[in-house]
Image: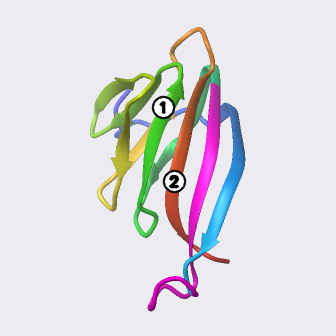
Amino acid sequence: MGNAQAAPETKGVTVELLATVDLGPEIEGMAGWQLRMRRVSIAPGGVFGPVHNHKDRPGTVFILHGTITDHRNGIATDYGPGVGWPEDRNTTHWLENRGTVAAVEISVDLIRQA
């Protein structure tokens, strides 16, 4: 399924906030921004959708356990433990777990504070 098609809705996903840092006091010009780290678990058959982008929310992902399929630009790429991918302003994608065990990733990104 490419990005031109609608991705399934999110199901089987658990997100745990691990840490945040308010960047305003840390770096001049970063007021209103936060560095965030989360643990995302996707159950077998789970989907992290729908298709979404990372404009104004760059980050990186590292796979701890299982395999996550990243769907972007009409290409499905499998990532297993010990690897990951960048999520920059050009990233538009959705994720799924096609495996038989839970897939767990660590996601670190910059977000605007509410």
* 59 to 76, vertically: above or below: below
- Secondary element under disc 2, as helix, strand or loop, is strand
Visible residue check, residue 80: yes
- Cα distance in 3D space between marks 2 and 1: 12 Å
For the image, the number of numbered tags is 2
Q: In the rendered view, does 103 fall on the left or right side of 72?
A: right
Q: Amino acid at mark 1?
A: Ile
Q: Residue furthest bottom?
A: 28
- The residue carrying mark 1 is 63
Q: Residue furthest top?
A: 100
Residue 61, percent from left and from top: 45, 43
- The residue carrying mark 2 is 108
- Magenta segment includes 33: yes
* Magenta-colored span: 25-42
Residue 55, percent from left and from top: 40, 65
- Magenta segment includes 93: no
What's the residue at 72%, 45% (across, down)? 16
What's the residue at 53%, 82% (across, down)? 26
Residue 44, percent from left and from top: 62, 16
* 35 to 5, vertically: above or below: below
For residue 71, the mark is none
Q: In the rendered view, does 76 fall on the left or right side of 54?
A: left
Residue 15, percent from left and from top: 69, 43
- Secondary element under disc 1, as helix, strand or loop, is strand
Q: In the rendered view, does 20 fall on the left or right side of 86?
A: right
